[in-house]
Structure formats: structure tokens, C-alpha cells
Amino acid sequence: MPSWNVNVAGVWKTLVSPAVNVAGTWHNILQGWVNVSGTWQLFFAAFTPPVVHTYNTAGGFTEVIPFGASNVVIEAWGAAGGGCQGVGTGCAQDNGASGGSGGYGRSTYSVGGQGGQTIVGTIGTGGANGGTTADSGTRSSVSSGTFAITTISAPGGGGAANPTGGGAGGSGTGGNQANAAGNAGQNSHGTGVGGAGVVGVHGTGAGGGNAGFGATHPGISGGPGLVIFYYT
Amino acid sequence: MTHFEHYISGAVFGIKYIFDTVYDGLPRHSHDTTTAHNIIVLRGEVRVLFDDHTVNLHAGDVYDFDGARAHSILAVSSNTCILNLFLNGQPVEYRTLPAQELKGEFDVRDFNREMVTPTEEMT
């Protein structure tokens, strides 16, 4: 989120709630724009709760705490495991084994006066679908940057291996509000649906990859992990 | 148990099934043109169950029907053997199947699908 800094007696300060007086009445400034070489660019945006930052692409990320926020709820889900191809041919086609969903952790922290500080993390990679064996999802995590937190770690869900469904992702750890395990996938000849994603407060994790129906139809890969920062 | 084995002879393709006991069989299903088949009873007796009627087949019978209509097949006698010949030959995607899909066995009761309840006269 862009910030607006002013130099006061040689010290740079970040404006949290700038206001302007119009005909005797003070109004909060919600946005500030500047024209650079003919292009308008946003240089300031007021904190208007809730502010939600979502990460769901596999790989690392750096979260910047927005100025003006007083509290954050951090939720992390591990990536889901992949589903297998179906089983059987001809008259005996049926669902193969499906993948499990990832574990979950949730924390809350006071972030008043911490605008601009960072928190880092990693989004787990969803397990690839497979023939007779699919891949497991990998762990998502959230940990200290310049702002210190207890690391939240959410394991990935298990990949299916016909005829056995993928295991549930292990319980998350490090959450100071909640930690939970994922849900297992189904064995062959089940409904073929992957383990349900864990339902959090502000989002739901990826469900395990569904299985294919019949030996010539592949399963579905598991979805990536998820991390949500919910600021108020 | 139901034992299955793919059968191919030139351009002719089919799947042979052996049903160990009464109640063994094939779950309710239907076909598109790539997997539609007839039924040749090589040994024993089977019952083909459609939603609105049933057909009893005995050793030596050859049965053609509309495979797009949902049906199931249940053995009426033990050690029953049928050969389902595919009307349009081997589906292309069957050429690369792993070995366990070409020959093996399964228990029809493991299928999570609507099944037809065997009647007393089948026992």
C-alpha cells in the first residue's frame, strides 16, 4: 500500500490519517495522486478496514503491514495432494483414488504502529496428478520478517496412490488461535472427490485433487497453498 | 470376485469376464460408441438388468442391445463366463493401459454406485 511521508525537522514521518480542511470542515484524505510525465500515479491510500492481502501462487512472498492497521489475522493452508487416474475399463470403469487437503494454522497479532514492517512466507505447491501415484502437496509457512511472529507451518495434503486415497495433511503448527489437520482423499471406488479443504475464518484451503473415472481418464492436480492476511 | 481379461484378435476387441459366484457381476453403467458392446455367454447364466426390464441369457446366447441405456450384469450361476465384444474395436486409449488394467479382478460390491438387488430366484 503506498504511503505518504513528510519530513519534520529532518525526520521522515509517515502520515497515517492525513486530513484537509474544506470551508471549515475537516475531511480525511482517502487517496493521493500525483501526475508523473502525464501519468497519474497513486502515492497514498488511507487504511480502510478490512484490508485483505491474499497469496495463492506457489513460491515465496513478502507481506508489508499497511499503515493504520491495528490487528491482523493470519491464516495459512498447505497445498493439496493430487488425484489419480480412474480405474477399470469397459463395463467396470470407476473412480480412482483422490488427494488429501493440506493442514491449517491461524494466528492473530497486534500490529498497531508497525506499518511498513514485513512478514515473509512460502506458498506450497499443489501435488501433480498421477497415473497410479500422484504427488503430495507441499507445506505453506508464514514467519518473521522485520516484524516478529511465531512461524505458522501448514503441511501439504497427501497424494493419492491407487487404490489408496491421499492422506490428510498434518495439523498446522505455530498458530496461536487454531491449528488443524486437512482431510484425507478417498480410496478407489469412492466418489472420486478429493479431501475437503479446511474452512478457515476468512477463506478455505484447496481441496484435494479429484480422481479420474475409468483407467483412461487422469485425475486432477491439487491446488496450491493459501495465506490470507486480514487487517483491521 | 469378478475376473476380467482383455481379448484382442486382429481388429476384434473384447473383454472376458468370469463371475465366481451368484451376485458377482458388473455395476450399473452405460456406454458411448467407443465402448458399446454385445454379450456372448460362454458358460453359465447371466441377467442383464435395465431400468425397465431384465433379460436372461444362457450359455451360447449372443445378445445385442443399445449400450447407451444404463444396464448392469449379474451372474445367475457360479463360475459364469461372458465375452463382451466391442462393436467398434479397441478404443485407441486402451492401447497404452498398464498391465493391471488388462487382466485382473475386482469385487463388484466395492463399487460406490447404484446396484441392483439380486432377487430370490437368482439364489
Image (tube, rainbow, N blue to C red):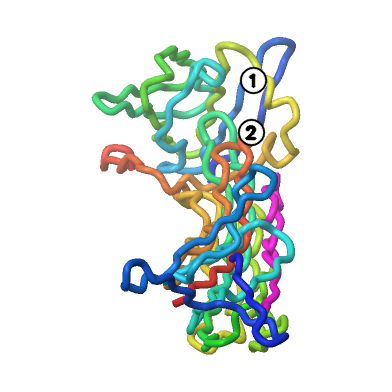
Q: Quadrant of residue A55?
A: bottom right
Q: Please indicate, yes or no, whether residue A168 appears anywhere in the rendered image.
A: no
Residue shown at the point (56%, 63%) measured from the top left: A54
Determine which residue is flagged by label 2: A216
Above or below: residue A151 compared with residue A186: below
Q: Amino acid at mark 1?
A: Pro
Please identify the residue farthest to the front as the structure is shown: A23
Residue shown at the point (37%, 27%) measured from the top left: B70
Q: Position of residue A115 (x, y in %)?
A: 60, 80
Above or below: residue A155 compared with residue A43: below
Query: Which chain is disc 1 placed on?
Result: B
Dot 1, how many residues are within 10 Å of its Cα: few (below 14), some (14-19), or many (20+)?
some
Q: Quadrant of residue B11?
A: top right
Q: Image quadrant for the N terminus of chain A?
A: bottom right
Q: Position of residue B78 (x, y in %)?
A: 47, 39
- On the same chain, marks 2 and 1? The answer is no
Instruction: Classify residue A178 as left or right of residue A89.
Output: left
Instruction: Classify residue A90 as left or right of residue A60.
Output: left
Q: Is disc 2 placed on a helix, strand or loop? A: loop
Determine which residue is flagged by label 1: B91
**Tag 2 and tag 1, C-beta contact below 8 Å:** yes
Instruction: Classify residue A93 as left or right of residue A122.
Output: left
Q: Magenta residues? A: A118-138
**Quick one: A51 or A157, which is closer to the camera?**
A51
